Image (spheres, coloured by chain):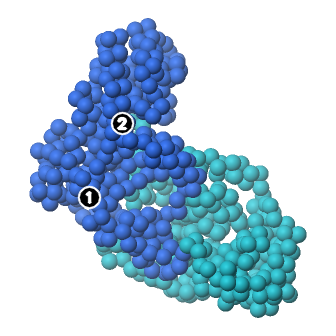
Chain colours: A blue, B cyan
């Protein structure tokens, strides 16, 4: 249930620490059973980047804590897509990006969460000046700032922060419960429209509302080429190996007519076998 | 001879490694004598952020290598300010910023250099997807890309990269030897003008051309307040504790008339004792 690059970061940290920690991968449905007292950290992506399947953060965090396990949640496909209550479920740490559902733009700043009970003890693996207690005193020794401020490291990318701030101004006026209700309704509509028009596409996103994020994904053998053909027609989803076509639902600016039009374009590409055209078979560097 | 926040990063890495490494600080003029076979890494800022004093990179690197020491250079005040020949002096690693002399904008991307002889062995302390051999294959295991590409970690901040690219387009058309000659001439002019007008300001930048970067700094007890008064008059330098007023020389867009005008403003503030006015005594968060 992890985004692969989260695992790369864990691998790098384990190698740097050099103390024999192990990275254990388990299937999403086996996470709960795999928790035991010999596990140090539970590191999970709440919403799976391929299928859109959502983990039960409250339940997993409670079980982890009963076993003395620290929890780290990746919220890349959660923040801005559905209500997230880190304090309510007692999560220890979380991180995420702002370039997906929070509309911070390409390569937008990341964010992290440290539970207040850890904020004066936790330290970043590396330490930099913006996390110093007095960043502009230019003292020779490092002294961590109090609270979560210590987790800042380098100079913030001001242009990217400015773009993100403009987006967050909008989010300040949004009720996440309304966004969530609308997202699920639009997702249901997309599922119904695509299943009716294109039976060769296999839904891999859970139908149950409490088990999904704000995306709808279908498995299709010609998925890569099909997505290229969709993008050429203005329907921009993406492809994730080996065969996943995914579509993000963003209710702030997508409505029912957009969903129906998307299903029409998908039908044109799949039923019309447009995806078989040679120009859509060429694999690009960025998928 | 280090920018303090470089030391914070080293402290953080040492704590994360937990293997008893020591961080030894020595005065700039004692670096060469302090090198010995028990030193693992020489980590120096080529041009001092306060005084503008420049280290002899070629000489220090040669001595370090003779003792089996790896060299890491901070080029924050070098890149775009003077010619830097990392390959020529055999440096192992270097890092720097693009928001000073390279005009990348506030919080612009950093850069790093890895000598080609290390590029297939070195690894980042953490590892992320942009340094993976196949970033978009989303494999579960990390496999470092060949060469320096492996040192990339996260998604690049695209807005910041776009701004930097526009700046680097200009730098592509610039002869660094010409920039350097002009920088030194303008620096000499600023020193002469300020020393003639304001004898209470004490030059802390070396006069010798081969020992300085592209800034001129003066020590002055009322330096913080004086800099606030200068900024209010459109002369934007900055203050570095405890008493340094520094002025960057950027020949791409500053000429002799700007230098003379700067000296006039400094004279007005210092000789006219404008800096004693209460509004310039208030210390801001960012200095």
Residues at marks 2 and 1 on the same chain = yes
Q: In this view, does B177 lie to the left or right of A132?
A: right
Q: Which residue is drawn at 32% across and 77% down?
A: B20
Find out whether the residues at labels 2 and 1 contact each other: C-beta distance under 8 Å.
no
Element on which disc 2 rests: helix
Nearest the eye: B127 or A49? A49
The residue labelled by disc 1 is A92
Identity of the residue drawn at 32% across and 67% down: A119
Q: Residue furthest top?
A: A272
The residue sitting at the bottom extreme is B200
* Quarter of the view holding residue A17: bottom left
Residue A147 visible, this angle: yes
Give left or right: position of B93 versus B256: left
Specify which label sits upstream in the sequence, 2 or 1: 1
Question: Which residue is at a point 68% across and 59% down the rendered structure image?
Answer: B102
Give the percent coordinates (x, y) of residue B22. Answer: 39, 80
Chain containing mark 2: A
Q: A173 above or below B29?
A: above
For disc 2, the marked residue is A178
Q: Is residue B233 above or below residue A231?
A: below
Dividing the image into 4 quarters, which one contains the N terminus of chain A? top left
Residue shown at 73% from the left, 72% from the top: B232
């Amino acid at each position: 249930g992890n985004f692969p690059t989260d695992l790369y970061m864990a691998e790098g940290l384990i190698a740097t620490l050099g103390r024999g920690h192990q990275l254990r991968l388990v299937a999403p449905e086996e996470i709960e059973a795999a928790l035991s007292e010999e596990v140090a950290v539970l590191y999970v992506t709440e919403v799976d980047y391929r299928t859109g399947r959502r983990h039960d953060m409250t339940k997993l965090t409670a079980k982890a804590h009963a076993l003395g396990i620290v929890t780290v949640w990746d919220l890349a496909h959660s923040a801005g897509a559905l209500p997230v209550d880190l304090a309510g479920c007692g999560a220890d740490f979380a991180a995420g990006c702002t370039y997906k559902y929070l509309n911070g733009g390409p390569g937008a700043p990341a964010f992290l969460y440290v539970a207040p009970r850890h904020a004066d003890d936790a330290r970043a693996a590396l330490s930099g000046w913006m996390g110093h207690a007095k960043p502009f005193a230019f003292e020779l020794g490092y002294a961590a700032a109090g609270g979560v401020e210590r987790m800042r490291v380098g100079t913030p990318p001001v242009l990217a922060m400015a773009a993100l701030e403009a987006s967050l101004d909008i989010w300040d006026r949004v009720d996440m419960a309304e966004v969530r209700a609308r997202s699920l309704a639009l997702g249901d509509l997309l599922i119904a429209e695509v299943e009716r028009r294109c039976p060769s596409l296999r839904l891999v996103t859970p139908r149950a509302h409490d088990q999904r994020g704000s995306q709808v994904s279908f498995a299709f053998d010609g998925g890569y080429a099909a997505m290229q053909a969709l993008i050429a027609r203005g329907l921009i989803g993406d492809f994730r190996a080996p065969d996943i076509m995914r579509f993000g639902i963003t209710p702030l600016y997508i409505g029912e007519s957009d969903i129906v039009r998307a299903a029409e374009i998908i039908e044109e590409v799949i039923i019309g076998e447009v995806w078989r055209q040679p120009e859509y078979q060429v694999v690009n560097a960025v998928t």
